[in-house]
Image (spheres, helix red, strand yellow):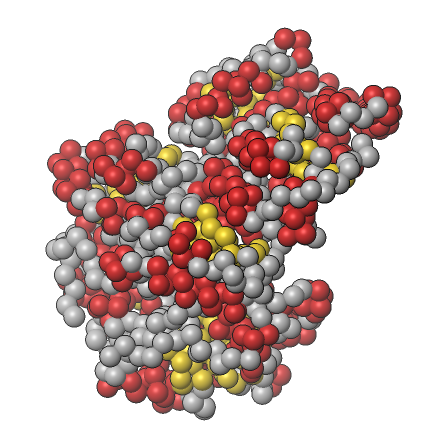
Amino acid sequence: MAINIDIPDVGTRESRLGSITGYNGDLHDLVNKSQCGGLKNRDRCFSQSSSCNAGCALGQLSGIRDIAIINHAPSGCSAIAPDVNVANAQLSAKRGVTNSTVFIGTDMNEKDTVFGATKSLRDIVIETYKRYKPKAVFIGTSCVTGIIGEDVDSVVEELKKELPIPIAAVHCEGFRSRIWASGFDECDHAVLSTIVKPAKTKRNVINFKNFFESAREEIIDIFKNFDVEPFFLYQNSTVEELSRLSESLATVCICGTLGTYLGNGLEEKFGVPYVRTINPLGITGFETWLREIGNVINKGTEVEDYIAREREIYIPQIDAIKKELKGLRAVLGMGPGYTFEVSRVLQELGVEVVWAAAWHYDKKYDNGKVPPALDYLLENSPNNFKLSIADQQNFEILNILNKYKPDIYFSRHPGTTVWAIKQGIPALFVADEYMIFGYKGTLSFARTLLDTLKNRSFEKNLAARSKLPYTDWWYKQENGKFLREEHK
Amino acid sequence: MAKILDQPRYKCAMTAMQTVQSITRAIPILHSGPGCAQKLNGSVGSSGYFSPHIFPCTNISEKEVVFGGEKRLKETIENSLKVIDADLYVVLTSCTSEIIGDDAFEVVRSFKDADKPVIYASTPGFKGNNYTGHDWVVKAIIDQYLKPSEEKITGLVNIWSGPPMHDPFWLGNLRALEKLVEELGLIPNTIFGQGRGLKNIDKIPKAEFNLLVSPWVGLENVKLLEEKFGTPYLHYPTIPIGAFETSKFLRSVAEFAEIDKGKVQKIIDKHEEEYYYYIERFADVFLETRVMSKRFVVVSDAQYTLAVTNFLVNDLGLFPSKQYITDDTPNEYRDWIRNQFKTLSYDIEAEVEFATDGYLIHEEIKNTDFYGYPLILGSSWEKQVAKETNAHYLTISWPIIERLVINGTYVGYDGGLKLLEDIYSVVLTRFN
């Protein structure tokens, strides 16, 4: 589906990409169904609390420096404001820059749900502008504003005439998509439609979409070999820098789930090529990704030289540690941008993936193609591993762990790691998006994996003293028990 | 009417899921959108036997918004009873479920014969904040779960304080209050935290009296308990920090419980001797400082602003500048709370403002003369204004993001010493 940045609202992933949150089967079945179009979502008749798109949309935007996010919502929705504030302070300090971004709520009350609050919203935006002189304002909607039909778009149109800065509505009502990654797209849509300007010139820059730029220095050094500079977004980026995204030579992303809308949007609307390979995690991922960057920016030779040099340093070390990892069995529970990438890396390291759970699944990206990580696994995975789309449903994961008893569980979302530990299974939290980046990251990851398995004190101590939250009855059921039949 | 929430210091009513979670083996069932729990959770120490990842949730989507979500709630409760190993299931409603008009009460009523108790509280985010939401959940337990009891247990005292988990020191404080009450020969009964749970909830109607240690949160409920079970209550305005307030607290509780004055005095003397042994040894630090002025400001909820002001004035001899209360205290309690700031030693009175706009608070602090470096006690939000005003700065209330509190407490004699340790550990990082 073509990307349309002239409308205020981006479609959800369900409608745009046919994304799903419920599936239970295996790798081959999932990819085959994705390719032939036969993949349908399966709802749950029991579910545990998950996440919503507003957190992703507004969380991403709030990393931009010196802007204002106005969350038009009751006070609970803006409860993430303090985390945003502290993270921004810590991350900007690390970079040696300042970030005055504010995350403000409108504290809607019962009367507002009856009479509406667009007038108050308007006043709050103007007051915020007076206080902080932000470089842009993004107004995030909420479940409440969606249901009562607040006309936020009209407020935005009016304010555009009054304030000399870009203003956009971000339509992120929590109920509108079951896929919180829709929030990434809502964020990108706001940036593409209100901030990015057509290129006047081209620069030797590669847009690098990521979360928190922890490998910034390392990547700057790598890219120097190819005479390009990375520009990291959104954390610590400025509105002015973002307005020039169109001037870059290419866009890359650390996570396909995160990057699809911006990458494809920049390519389609501004002619900036989007590098859509498997991600730079693990050896194959890193090399495939680098080579494609080399192709796009005509630096193939430099890339090959770099790969050859680095291989000499790292491959023998990685090979040595692989001997110790061989034969281990793993279960993963992550977002789809990581589950299938990390599965590949684990297989590369000789670890057997017995079950991969992804919280949602995009059966295609915005270019209309199946995510490359899945294509790769279909061709290269040594086994047709079990797979579920599990929407962060912890009860399904613990059921899987109980049945398959892997040597290790890999998590990536806050609060999900301890549950495997309590069930007596070592777990490793793949927190940093760069944890497995490149040769060096792959080596560190392999070592950390081994360390996790070699000292099981914390896990043994805790598991011996904690009780599990689920009934025995549940552990006797199939993990997909509460998935309804496919919607026709 | 909607208002600017610049630097939020409270969350919405459904944050009362934390109140449920703090009762061991009680679980909230959320009739809400998928992201509510994740957003409201947002603090360390929020896992345990259950965590927000375990909370059943209807994860309301567009379909339920259009067609209603009662059926979805019903099946979620049914399956929760099968899957989750809990003793008490508390259904909480949300903005969405209430606006679309789902009758959660009716749905919950259909579970009255379930094997485990299922109760319900209306907690839409637009109706109140987490302080009021906490009260609504406790009220739901009183109204829908508790049964009158003929039996009274001599000396049994139910202790109530602020909302669990939102206050980082909630459990340490509660345990310290229990210990103080225990020293008087009474039997403390609390319902939150490890080893309490339903067995203690069942004891609530058997208590001799309710002890509310909080300015306003919980007041409605001790009144309700009096009405329902005839249990009298003592309302002590705030948590006691340090010798002055803790001794006063012990005397007040003892008087209410008709405990022999001589006995209480002995307990107080023993504690004060020990407390002042330490104060004596470290008095130089407090007296001979180049960097501490006499003025301080607290930006916190009613509980902490009052408690810390009492301590710093009555124990440490500091002087209050204008104080701020940020919990959006309901109007009916404000005058009474203001008066609590007028009963400090030496007839000192502290001006206090109820304010929810952090920007305006900070502007005032920047324009206040502290006659030296200010001492600011507040939340993560105060870090920036502290930097701009060269203040000594300590976080004591939500949001606290850059500090880990496990079971720490500022309550009691030891709690006062702990607060001094924390304040002066900041002060000592500076020579001039």
Task: Give me the residue at 58% from left, 84% from top.
Answer: A328
Judged left or right of residue B399, residue B234 is: right
Task: Give me the residue at 36% from left, 56% from top.
Answer: B33
Task: Give me the residue at 49% from left, 37% from top.
Answer: B131
Instruction: Please say whether residue A96 is visible from this viewpoint.
Output: no
Instruction: Please say whether residue A4 is visible from this viewpoint.
Output: yes
Above or below for B267 versus B130: above
Q: Position of residue A80 (x, y in %)?
A: 42, 47
> Quadrant location of the N terminus of chain B?
top left
Above or below for A460 versus B174: below
Judged left or right of residue B38, residue B177 is: right
Task: Please state which of residues A313 and B344 is positioned toward the viewer in this rendering.
Answer: B344
Q: Residue furthest front?
A: B150
Task: Give me the residue at 25% from left, 39% from top.
Answer: A114
> Quadrant location of the C terminus of chain B?
top right
Figure quadrant of residue A201: bottom left
Q: How many marks?
A: 0
Figure quadrant of residue A36: bottom left
Task: Please state which of residues B179 and B118 is positioned toward the viewer in this rendering.
Answer: B118
Q: Position of residue B305 (x, y in %)?
A: 56, 26
Figure quadrant of residue B355: top left
Q: Position of residue B280 (x, y in %)?
A: 82, 23
Task: Please state which of residues B337 and A376 is positioned toward the viewer in this rendering.
Answer: B337
Q: Position of residue B109 (x, y in %)?
A: 45, 55
Above or below for A227 versus B320: below
Above or below for A147 versus A441: above
